[in-house]
């Protein structure tokens, strides 16, 4: 079996012990495979009652602790996790399945492969339902939108990202879709003076709030929204479309 990057993953049958280094996939795995999860990151906040070992963050996992957990497979993501940590785990004899997701369609195909090939399990009902929801036609008027992910320095969602593709699927004119980087830094004054209908301010990875973010803009309307709806692939996609459409109207 090979993961999304084409790397062979030495699995011997259906994994009984799984460590997830991807918060959104932790939530997804917990729906149907909770008993198989033995370790997750500190950022794996959903479901809230998940009681398993915590192996630090997505960018600094405790490799020694993960090895001690003796997982049959570790689930990682090309964007969220470091290649260095993946390599160290593999050098320690741990099988690692790396997902690579930069669009809505890739999220569905990647998760289907994860379930069918890596987990040797049926495609979950929530995934089939999410695919149907995101296949529905666009019913929003096109609006010019930018989406911030950080401040000081201010950074926005750029090209080739799951979030950007999600916005495009909703009929939004994602103004940084052709930027030179995936998460480029921008000057606040330039951003505020652009011909935009809206700037989205999600609550992750930077926690924008009513008191922290909107006050920086003097010309462009802003809207707070769920970062989980914008950046998580998995069961959160069942409600993400309704939430984002309500914000973008």
Image (cartoon, rainbow, N blue to C red):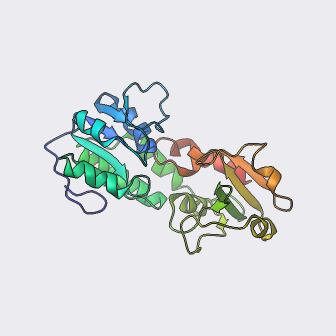
| 118 to 219, vertically: above or below | above
Q: Position of residue 189 (x, y in %)?
A: 79, 67
Q: Residue at x 50, y 34 (%)?
A: 45
Q: Position of residue 7 (x, y in %)?
A: 23, 60
Q: Position of residue 186 (x, y in %)?
A: 68, 67
Q: Position of residue 55 (x, y in %)?
A: 37, 36
Residue that protrudes farthest toward the right in the picture: 218
109 displayed left or right of 47? left
Q: Closer to the camera, 180 or 197?
A: 180
Q: Closer to the camera, 88 or 180?
A: 88
219 displayed left or right of 61? right
Q: Closer to the camera, 192 or 124?
A: 192
| 79 to 57, vertically: above or below | below
171 displayed left or right of 182? right
Q: Residue at x 58, y 48 (%)?
A: 205
| 111 to 39, vertically: above or below | below
Q: Assign the N terminus to one quadrant of the image.
A: bottom left
């Amino acid at each position: 079996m090979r993961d999304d990057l084409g790397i062979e993953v030495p699995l011997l049958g259906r994994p009984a012990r799984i460590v997830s280094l991807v918060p959104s996939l932790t939530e997804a795995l917990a729906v149907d495979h909770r008993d198989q999860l033995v370790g997750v990151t500190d950022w794996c906040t959903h479901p809230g009652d998940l009681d398993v070992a915590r192996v630090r963050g997505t960018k600094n996992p405790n490799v020694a602790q993960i090895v001690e957990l003796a997982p049959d497979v570790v689930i990682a993501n090309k964007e969220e996790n470091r290649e260095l940590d993946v390599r160290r785990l593999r050098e320690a004899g741990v099988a690692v399945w790396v997902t690579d997701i930069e669009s809505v369609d890739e999220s569905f195909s990647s998760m289907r492969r994860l379930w069918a090939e890596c987990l040797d399990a049926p495609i979950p009902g929530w995934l089939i339902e999410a695919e149907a929801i995101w296949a529905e036609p666009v019913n929003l008027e096109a609006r010019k939108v930018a989406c911030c992910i950080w401040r000081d320095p201010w950074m926005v969602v750029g090209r080739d990202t799951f979030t950007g593709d999600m916005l495009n699927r909703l009929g939004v004119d994602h103004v940084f879709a052709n930027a030179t980087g995936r998460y480029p830094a921008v000057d606040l004054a330039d951003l505020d003076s652009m011909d935009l209908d809206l700037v989205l301010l999600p609550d992750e990875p930077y926690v924008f709030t009513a008191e922290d973010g909107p006050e920086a803009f003097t010309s462009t309307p802003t809207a707070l929204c769920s970062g989980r709806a914008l950046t998580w692939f998995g069961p959160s996609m069942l409600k993400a479309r309704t939430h984002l459409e309500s914000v973008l109207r």
